[in-house]
């Protein structure tokens, strides 16, 4: 019986690191170029980010070969900045934009890079394990309207509910 419970737990945990049907991670990914600070431009709503503005994600190398992830944002209701530290590891080869990230070990979530400015690493679009999770990030707090619209159009074509995106404004 305990093996069955462990099997079910393993299956449910691995489902959290999946990728939505019809969505593909980017190839040719270069972690060294990706490291540093990213600003959230748009996201689908979730309780763990609700009420946060000026959201950033900072990525750096861990001693164990993984990636340190520090997400932070200003909580409007509490009038203070909140942050959470996690760890990420590649699910496939390091040149594929497909990682698993944990903020509460041993529970990992999917971090699927589905669009990336491969020339300059100025913007990225990330999907979770379902089409309910989507983020658009940029190196600066503002992303050009044309680029943002292209990413939104791409997400819509992939079946994400882009009408529900929350857009963060500059200076928030």
Image (cartoon, rainbow, N blue to C red):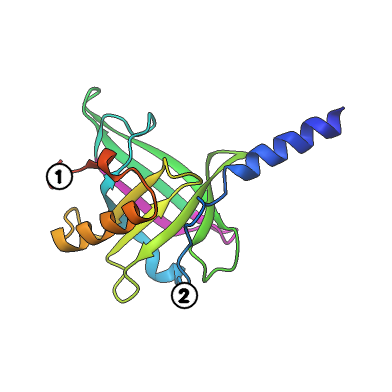
Q: Is residue 147 magenta?
A: no
Query: Which quadrant would residue 82 be assigned to in this image?
Result: top left
Of residues 81 and 142, which is closer to you in this image? 142
Query: Which quadrant would residue 106 be assigned to in this image?
Result: top right
Label 1 Cα neighbours within 10 Å, binned few <14 / some 14-19 / many ≥20: some
Of residues 69 and 92, which is closer to you in this image? 92
**Main SS of the magenta segment?**
strand
* Residue 160, position as x, y percentages in the image: 37, 47
Q: Residue at x 38, y 70 (%)?
A: 33
Count all numbered tags in the image, as a single digit: 2
* Residue 142, position as x, y percentages in the image: 16, 55
Label 2 Cα neighbours within 10 Å, binned few <14 / some 14-19 / many ≥20: few
> Taking 93 as reference, is 10 above or below it?
above
Q: Is residue 66 magenta?
A: yes
* Residue 37, position as x, y percentages in the image: 31, 56
Residue underneath mark 2: 28
In this picture, which residue range is highlighted in magenta? Answer: 54-67
Q: Residue at x 53, y 56 (%)?
A: 99
Of residues 30 and 44, which is closer to you in this image? 44
């Amino acid at each position: 019986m305990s093996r069955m419970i462990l099997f079910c737990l393993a299956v449910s945990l691995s489902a959290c690191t999946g990728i939505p049907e019809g969505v593909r991670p980017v190839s040719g990914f270069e972690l060294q170029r990706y490291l540093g600070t990213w600003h959230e431009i748009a996201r689908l709503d979730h309780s763990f980010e609700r009420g946060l503005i000026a959201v950033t994600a900072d990525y750096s190398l861990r001693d164990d070969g993984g990636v340190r992830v520090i997400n932070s944002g200003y909580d409007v209701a509490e009038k203070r900045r909140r942050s959470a530290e996690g760890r990420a590891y590649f699910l496939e080869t390091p040149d594929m934009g497909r990682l698993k990230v944990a903020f509460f070990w041993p529970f990992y979530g999917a971090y699927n890079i589905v669009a990336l400015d491969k020339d300059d690493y100025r913007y990225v679009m990330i999907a979770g394990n379902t089409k309910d999770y989507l983020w658009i990030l940029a190196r600066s707090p503002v992303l050009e309207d044309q680029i943002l619209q292209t990413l939104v159009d791409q997400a819509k074509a992939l079946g994400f509910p882009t009408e529900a995106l929350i857009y963060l404004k500059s200076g928030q």
